[in-house]
Every structure is written in C-alpha cells, then in structure tokens.
Amino acid sequence: MTGGFQPDPAELLFLPLGGSDEIGMNLNLYHYAGKWLMVDLGVAFGDDSTPGVEVLMPDPSFIAERRRDLAGLVLTHGHEDHIGALPWLWERLRCPVYATPFTASLARRKLAEAGLAGEVELVETPLPGRFALGPFEVETIGMTHSIPEPSAIAIRCAAGTVLHTGDWKFDPDPRIGPVADREALEALAAGGVLAMVGDSTNADIPGETGSEAELLDAFAELFEERDGRVAVACFASNVARLHGVARAAARAGRDTALVGRSLRRMNDAARENGYLLDIPRFLTEDDAGYIPRDRLAMICTGSQGEPRAALARIADDTHPRVSLEAGDTVVFSSREIPGNEKAIGRMQSKFAARGVEVVTEREAHVHVSGHPARGDLERMYQTIRPRIAVPVHGDARRLAAHAEVARACQVPEIAIPENGAVLRLAPGPAGVVARVPAGALAVDGSRLRPLDGGPVRERRKLLHNGSVAVTVVMDGRGRGLGDPMVTATGLYDRDEAEAFDALLSDCVREAVGGLPPGRRRSDGAVAEAARRAVRGAARAEFGKRPEVSVHVARV
C-alpha cells in the first residue's frame, strides 16, 4: 500500500502525481466527497541519464489502490505528455476515459495497438461540453495550442470551481480550429473561480506567444530561396504546423511528403475529424524519391534527436527511402525540450558535416510555441480572477516565474505543489495537508519498472562507474585454489587490462586470505571481502566505484 492517507470528504483536494517539478508525465488528481477525478495521463522521454529507457511515466500506485473511488479520467488534449501513458497504465485504473473527438481518435489508436480497443470505455465529449463525474461537474472549454481540440477543464463541485487550463495559449489565428473560447472563460469567471491550476512552460518568457499564422510567409520564403530538398522537423502532433508548411510549400511550387510513422498516424486522425481537408494529400516516403530535389518539401519526425525517429536515421544516412545531401536544408521547427540539447546538437552536427544547411529558430522565424508567455498568463489571470493560483507543468524555475506573474496580478493565494503533495483548495486557506508516494516508471523493453530501482538503477551506475566480475575458487575448507579471476568493463583500457586485472586479483586474494578460517568457509563472507577489496582498489587507482559481482565456486 502507498500509505494510510484518508482524505476528508468535505475537502476539495488537488494532488499531482506527475507534471509538477517537471515538464511531462502529467497525472493530476482532484478529490471531493470520497471520489477522485483524474486529469491527463502522460509520458516523458528518457535522455542520457536513463540508459536503455526511452519512455517514462508517473507511478499511479496511489490512485490504482483507490480505483474504486476513481470517477474517471479526462484528457485535455492529445500530446504524448498528456495521453501517452494511457495504454500502459489503464489496466491498473480501469476507469472510463473522456476526450474530445480528435483526442479520442489518437487514444483509440494507442489502445488498439496495446490490445485494449474493446476493453476501455472511451467517451467522446463535445467541445464545448458538460458532463457529470461523481460529485464533479466537468466543462470542457476550447483553447488554442499546437494540436487540435485543446481544452481547459472547469471542475465544479459543492466546495468550489477549479479551472485546470491544460496546455494553452491565446492565438488569434491558429489556422486549425477556432480561437480560444473567451466567452466561456468570462462566464466561468462571473460565477467565481476558487483556483486556477495552470501551465507554466513559458512563464519565464516576456511578452505574448506568437501566432501560428505568422510562420506562413517565413516558410514560403525559405522554400523559394532553396534549390535543394527542404526537410522540416516538427512535432507530429502539431497539425497546424503541418497545414502551414504544406501551404507554404505549395506557394513555392513544392510538393510535401510526410516522413515518419507518427506523422502519418496524426494526418489520418486529423482528416477523419475534419482537419487538413483544404490541402492536398501528402506524398509518402516512397513518392519522395521521384520528385525533383528543388520541388520537394518533407516534414519529418525526430526534432528532439530521438535515435529511432526519421530525422536521426536521415542524419546517419541509414533511412531506407529518404536522404539529404550537400545543398539541401533541414529546418528545426520546434523548441528544444530541456534534456534533449545534446542529442539535437549531435544530429545537427552530422548534417552540417555533410554540407546540409541547418536552420533553427535562431536563424529564421520557423517556430512559435504552443504555451503562454508572461503576457498571456497576465491576460488569463485578469479574466479568471481566481482566489488561488496553482502553477504546474514546469520545472522549479518556471513554476517560480508563474508564481511571480500571479502575484503581480494580485491573486490572493499562491500554492506550488510538488508531485505527491496533497494540496487542500477548500475549505479554508490553501495548503499541503499530506504527502503520498510519487515516482516514475520506466518502459524497460517490454516491462514497466521503477525508475529508481532494479535494472535501471544498475545501468545508471554502470554508465558512470563500470563493472567488475570476480570469480574465486575455493575448497570446502576455505583454501584458495589458484588466483581469483577478474574481468573489468568500462574501467580501464585494453592495453592496461593485464596489469590491472592482476592488481585487482592480488587485492582479492589478500582480502580473502586475511579472513579467519571459519569466515573463509562462508560464501557470503568471501564475496563481501572480495567486493570491498575491488571497490577500494578501483577507487584508489581510478577514482571510480564500479558495480562488483562475485562468484564463489567450491570444489
């Protein structure tokens, strides 16, 4: 069990299990009258600090143990950091899932791939729309973001009303879908808003976030000026960017191909929900090879340096159908997610070394964010006028910046929760009333494992300190038979192996030989003595603390 915390039925509580202290892995819980409501269930992506792990997600153990009291899961929009954990974690929750039609299309595809298509109660909700979940009345309010149908969630109960913003910005010309529903926001504010739980991603950036429409002319000019192929890397979910790039390419006399499976899936979901119908069908990767280089634009997955995505394979010249060469251009039409800078930089260097021009938002106006900058946040607070500001969806720096904005807007109370902190919103002043376990799970091959335990933790240690395997052969009376055998990995160079293997072997022999006779007959005592000897010698010689495994053989 995750602990004995028992919520007071009269209290309206907010509990993030993911998405606070970080960007990604969103899992938010609200409690009232004995029932829980979940908002979003997302993933984050591994980096150099998580060897062998590409996908991370919040540990849902707290709410999984209380799933009988879980009224449902509401998805704010279709980005991976908000829906990506659904196929992995739903069986632990087994609750109905509510989503707008486009988001439901994406969720349905994910569930089908996981073999859950017939099991999950997936309820499509209109935008705008209202429905009841236990003691909560939920209203979806249309916003703008970098994906169709982003919705803020108004959560009403007898203790008060909360606006959970999801990811959003105010875009006067989003290209795909309507503008944010300011009338609904104003109507919500007129009824009084207890708390706003809000996006902090760009809270440290002054001014207002630009409009998606601003990019059309910039991309058209870029396509017109280049003679070779132009590949645009962006998030597959940014349907408005797909639309804008395709229109700009057509203006410059280029056809547009999609390169990457997730782009094709997103295109299919968009078209089945009525989006992208005013542009021609995209070409396939197979088609791209038949189009003259100066007549082709490509949209590729992999803007964050993901090693198996299309752009990384093109950079390595291992993609089976698509290539870029000197005179071609690759455009990075996305922001660098913190932690991905090294992977992106390595990929860009590979292109530059081959004579491929690299264009980022530093060289041209090729990206606008989908999140609110300080000016947008100020407008939202001036509209909603909540009693409590709850910054989420950001690291500590961004959460603090969001709090500064709320304070400047004279919000009476500000509460910044950590993952696992139970925040009381009502009655009385906001404050943390309890803490529950919260952590991350890693997709390790085909299994989910705790990020800070087991094989993942061991690989982290191996990454930084190497490993040593030791075999000690002894007879039943505790006498050593031959020298201990030592094999080290990641500790020293091959040409040093003979000398240092011998050094470590000598240390083990001396440590084991120094044990009292009775202790030498204990495999555990021999293994511990050998382990300590190797770690001590490695620390003294190399400044490392390797993982040491010892096998004691008795003959």
Image (cartoon, rainbow, N blue to C red):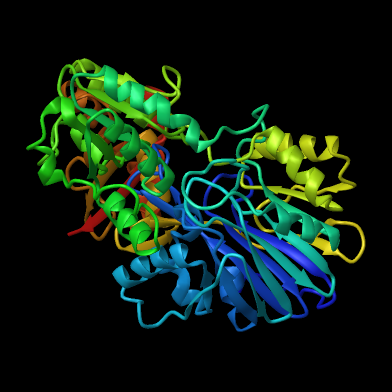
Residue 466, horizontal then vertical, whole percent: 33, 36
203 relative to 497 in the view: left or right? right
Quarter placement of the C terminus: bottom left
Residue 463, horizontal then vertical, whole percent: 35, 37
Q: Quadrant of residue 382?
A: top right
Rendered residue at 63%/42% (across/down): 170
184 relative to 48 in the view: left or right? right
124 relative to 405 in the view: left or right? left
Rendered residue at 70%/33% (across/down): 374
Residue 455, horizontal then vertical, whole percent: 37, 54
Total labels: the figure holds 0
Which of the pair 211/337 is nearer the observer? Answer: 211
Q: Quadrant of residue 322?
A: top left
Evaluate whether residue 488 shows in this view: no
| Extreme-right residue of the structure | 428
329 relative to 292 in the view: left or right? right
Rendered residue at 50%/52% (across/down): 177
Rendered residue at 18%/22% (across/down): 228
- Give the answer, above or below, for where 71 lies relative to 311: below
- Give the answer, above or below, for where 129 lies relative to 423: below
- Give the answer, above or below, for where 194 lies relative to 471: below
Residue 491, horizontal then vertical, whole percent: 30, 30
Evaluate whether residue 554 shows in this view: yes
Quarter placement of the N terminus: bottom right
- Give the answer, above or below, for where 215 lies relative to 485: above
| Extreme-left residue of the structure | 290
Q: Quadrant of residue 539?
A: top left
